[in-house]
Image (tube, grey):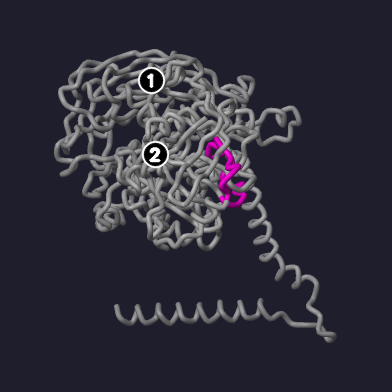
């Protein structure tokens, strides 16, 4: 046996030497007397390099085609309202429906049309708070679960509610787990604050098909279904990721994967990091799963092997380093976004963040501080941002990459690949639908330039609430909410600052400011933030920059007017933490600040007391907090 082994080793060694000598000969061809390489051998030596260049060029062309089928505009084209914050936005794969659900129990159906979407139907689905929603992989069914302990099932094509199940437990998550053609339309629901999973037939009665109480040891925090391999992927709050089959596989460990034990995989990586998955996404071909984790790292796993394929760090430290290297945003704007990010991380809404794959499976899209990142999975490079210029912290996103033209519904892949000039007229209309932090709207990013100046991109498709009607009438009860005051004087300990107001162009903002002034709200407020050669800020009763409210309580919407810009020094503008978050804080600039246009409401200009503003901007401040060492107070504000 040993002799045979030695002979094999010698034979292998001899064959390796022969192959090396052959390669050496190919790499050093014999030359003619004049030193030139024979033409035939030169062609053979150049052929591999030519094939490589062609392959690289072909891959580059393919990537361009995939990128063309993604939205490219940096600003959202349109936005549509709900009466409360959105918890889910879904796009059906084949039927072309967009479904939005808000936490107050309302569900809306929209249909993707050419260059727009059209409202279809509105449901008051639940009396309680919606906890989760899910759309089936084939786009035929949609469901929601709420804290009223009910499951509502919707037939998407007929945009109608087809079933309702009363649950004997408090639900937390829901996920469809069937493919087209299955006899049972199974849906799995997790119990809140429990490790139990309940599987139901969505078109049957209230009795569960199966109760899984040993699959996880901790409460389940995310569930996804791989329709290609008919496998459910779930994760609990301890970071443990599990694979299991649906009713057809008797809820057993799937046989399609290439591992037997999890120790052979990297599925323990999330638990090792003491984190858990907020959401899990599956690529269309079923090869990859992407987990958005609570430690702000997006991990991409190979589904069949369970190996970690890519990871993308979106922690504050990593994002700050990227910002310092590339300066995607201004320093002030980036600081504001980091503050919003901290608020988001402390809230329960961070768990609504998700990641999605495009149709090709080559790109991963996920919201971040800098906008929606589009990363190429193989090269791990960020190819572009979507919505970077918008002051929105996007959370949940959904992608539409189809063709809304019904005449193109029967086209095959061969027909699309042909050079038929008639088919060139039929183009896809890629759109990204997104929810945002503390917003009652969903936003549409497309390839069309948005109408940013006329204000028509924010569609008012909801009736105003009682609070909004009261706000429209104003505190004093006069219609339109416009204040008669057109001037104000801020009396400070360093002197008076006289301001001209614009009640005709931003009536609600001026009314809020004037009413606060008349009520003595601003009395004894300090200038809590002063940045030399930039601005001075006040209006916070706590003096920390984190307080303040409007005269209606809470926050109110922006009033961006195209003629009121930050193009001059001594501009008076509202401070905020994002769109629609105005309260009581305001600031006065000392230089032109055009990067603040369309992000802050300009409602006044200083026409007298310019030296007072300048003197305040030059006082000594704490470099860490930007707060003056000595308090500079507002005595009161008078109006006329």
Q: Indicate the quadrant where residue 211 lies.
A: top left
Q: Within 10 angstroms of label 2, few (less than 14), some, or many (20 or more) residues?
A: many
- Per the rendered image, the range of residues in magenta is 590-610
Residue 356 in view:
no
Is 110 part of what is drawn in magenta? no
Q: What is the x, y in percent for residue 228?
A: 40, 37
Nearer to me, 276 or 444: 444
Q: Disc 2 or 1, which lies upstream in sequence?
A: 1
**Residue found at the very far bottom of the displayed protein:** 33
Q: Left or right: 421 with respect to 483?
A: right
* Magenta segment includes 598: yes
Residue 522 shows which numbered tag?
2
Q: Where is residue 427 in the image (x, y as percent from the top left)?
A: 66, 31
Point out residue 345 in the picture as x, y percentages from the top left corner: 33, 46
* Mark number displayed over residue 159: none
Q: Can residue 511 be seen in this view?
A: yes
Q: How far apart are marks 2 and 1 (CA)?
A: 23 Å
Residue 354 vs residue 496: left or right?
A: left
Q: Residue at the spot x=26%, y=52% of the render?
A: 260
Residue located 46% across and 81% down the image: 13
Which image quarter holds the N terminus? bottom left
- Where is mark 1, residue-wise? 467
């Amino acid at each position: 046996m040993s002799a045979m082994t030695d002979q094999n080793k010698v034979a292998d060694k001899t064959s390796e030497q022969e192959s090396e000598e052959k390669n050496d000969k190919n790499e050093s061809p014999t030359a003619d007397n004049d030193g030139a390489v024979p033409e035939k051998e030169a062609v053979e030596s150049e052929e591999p390099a030519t094939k490589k260049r062609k392959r690289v060029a072909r891959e580059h062309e393919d990537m361009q085609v995939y990128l063309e089928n993604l939205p490219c505009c940096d600003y959202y084209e349109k936005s549509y309202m709900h009466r409360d914050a959105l918890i889910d936005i879904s796009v059906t794969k084949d039927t072309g429906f967009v479904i939005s659900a808000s936490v107050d129990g309302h569900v809306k159906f929209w249909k993707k049309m050419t260059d727009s979407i059209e409202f279809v139907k509105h449901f008051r689905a639940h009396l309680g708070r919606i906890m989760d929603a899910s759309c089936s992989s084939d786009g035929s069914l949609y469901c929601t679960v709420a804290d009223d302990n009910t499951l509502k099932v919707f037939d998407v094509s007929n945009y109608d509610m087809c079933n309702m199940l009363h649950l004997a437990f408090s639900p937390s998550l829901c996920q469809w787990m069937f493919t087209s053609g299955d006899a049972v339309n199974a849906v799995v629901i997790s119990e809140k604050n429990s490790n139990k999973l309940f599987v139901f037939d969505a078109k049957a009665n209230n009795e569960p098909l199966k109760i899984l109480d040993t699959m996880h040891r901790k409460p389940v925090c995310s569930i996804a279904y791989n329709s290609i391999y008919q496998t459910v992927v779930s994760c609990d709050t301890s970071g443990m990721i599990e694979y299991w089959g649906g009713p057809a596989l008797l809820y057993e460990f799937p046989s399609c994967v290439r591992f037997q034990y999890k120790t052979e995989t990297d599925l323990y990586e999330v638990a090792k990091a003491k984190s858990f998955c907020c959401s899990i996404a599956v690529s269309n071909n079923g090869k990859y799963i992407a987990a958005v984790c609570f430690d702000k790292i997006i991990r991409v796993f190979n589904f069949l092997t369970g190996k970690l394929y890519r990871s993308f760090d979106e922690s504050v430290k990593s994002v700050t380093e990227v910002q310092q290297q590339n300066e995607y945003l201004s320093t002030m704007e980036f600081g504001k976004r980091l503050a919003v990010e901290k608020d988001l991380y402390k809230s329960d809404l961070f768990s609504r963040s998700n990641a999605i794959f495009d149709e090709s499976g080559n790109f991963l899209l996920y919201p971040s501080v800098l906008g929606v990142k589009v990363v190429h999975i193989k090269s791990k490079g960020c190819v572009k941002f979507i919505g970077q210029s918008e002051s929105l912290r996007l959370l949940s996103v959904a992608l539409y990459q189809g063709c809304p033209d019904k005449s193109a519904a029967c086209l095959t892949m061969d027909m699309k690949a042909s050079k038929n000039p008639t088919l060139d007229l039929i183009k896809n209309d890629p759109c990204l639908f997104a929810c945002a932090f503390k917003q009652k709207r969903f936003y549409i990013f497309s390839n069309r330039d948005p109408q940013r100046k006329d204000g028509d991109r924010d569609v008012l498709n909801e009736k105003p609430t009682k609070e909004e009607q009261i706000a429209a009438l104003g505190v004093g009860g006069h219609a339109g909410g416009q204040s008669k005051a057109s001037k104000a004087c801020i009396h400070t300990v360093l002197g008076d600052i006289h301001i001209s107001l614009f009640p005709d162009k931003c009536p609600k903002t001026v009314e809020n400011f004037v009413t606060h002034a008349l009520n003595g709200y601003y009395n004894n407020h300090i200038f809590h933030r002063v940045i030399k050669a930039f601005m001075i800020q006040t209006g916070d009763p706590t003096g920390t920059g984190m307080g303040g409210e409007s005269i209606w309580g809470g926050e109110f919407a922006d009033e961006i007017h195209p003629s009121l810009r930050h193009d001059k020094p001594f501009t008076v503008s509202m401070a905020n933490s994002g769109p629609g978050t105005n309260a009581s804080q305001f600031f006065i600039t000392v230089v032109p600040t055009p990067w603040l246009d369309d992000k802050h409401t300009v409602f006044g200009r200083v026409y007298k007391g310019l030296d007072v503003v300048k003197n305040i901007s030059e006082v000594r401040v704490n470099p860490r907090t930007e707060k003056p060492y000595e308090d500079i107070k507002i005595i009161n504000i008078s109006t006329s």
